[in-house]
């Protein structure tokens, strides 16, 4: 049981580091002055899910879910 807890703890630390790096790689969500004139509805804005920014958002979501699950599992008293 101690080996499993050690492996999960190491995995938890790796997820924490990866989550920190991916969050720092993301750009800010501020639209800037382009939103005033309506320039936000460009091709790039409509297809963000296929861009690098969209991929980073998807990885962030997956890592956050893994982070929450592992933190709950590691905090079980009987574990």
Image: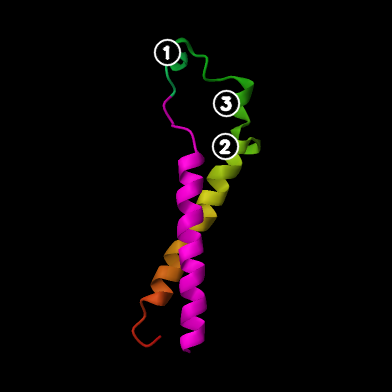
Crowd around label 1: few <14 · some 14–19 · many ≥20 (10 Å): few
Which percent across, then down, holds residue 42? 59, 19
Q: Secondary structure at mark 1?
A: helix
Asked if 78 appears above or below 28 in the picture, the reply is below
Instruction: Identify the mark nearer the N-term, 2 or 1.
Output: 1
Crowd around label 2: few <14 · some 14–19 · many ≥20 (10 Å): some
- Locate the C terminus and report the quarter of the image it occupies: bottom left
How far apart marks 3 and 2 lie (CA) works out to: 11 Å
Q: Residue at x 48, y 33 (%)?
A: 27
Quick one: which residue is furthest to the top in this view?
37
How far apart marks 2 and 1 lie (CA) works out to: 22 Å
Q: Nearer the viewer, residue 62 or 74?
A: 74
Residue 43 part of the magenta segment: no
Which percent across, then down, holds residue 71? 40, 69
Numbered mark located on residue 45 in the image:
3
Which percent across, then down, holds residue 29? 44, 31
Q: Residue at x 51, y 40 (%)?
A: 25
Q: Secondary structure at mark 3?
A: helix
How far apart marks 3 and 1 lie (CA) works out to: 15 Å
Q: Secondary structure at mark 2?
A: helix
Numbered mark located on residue 53 in the image:
2
Q: Main secondary structure of the magenta part?
A: helix
Instruction: Identify the mark nearer the N-term, 3 or 1.
Output: 1
Q: Can residue 66 be seen in this snapshot?
A: no
Q: Residue at x 57, y 26 (%)?
A: 45
Instruction: Identify the mark nearer the N-term, 3 or 2.
Output: 3
* Span colored in magenta: 1-30
Numbered mark located on residue 36 in the image:
1
């Amino acid at each position: 049981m101690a080996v499993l807890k050690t492996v999960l703890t190491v995995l938890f630390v790796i997820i924490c580091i990866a989550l920190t790096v991916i969050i720092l790689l993301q750009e800010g969500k501020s639209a800037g002055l382009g939103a005033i004139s309506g320039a936000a509805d460009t091709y790039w804005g409509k297809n963000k899910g296929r861009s690098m920014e969209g991929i980073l958002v998807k990885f962030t979501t997956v890592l956050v879910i893994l982070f929450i699950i592992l933190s709950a599992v590691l905090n079980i008293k009987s574990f």
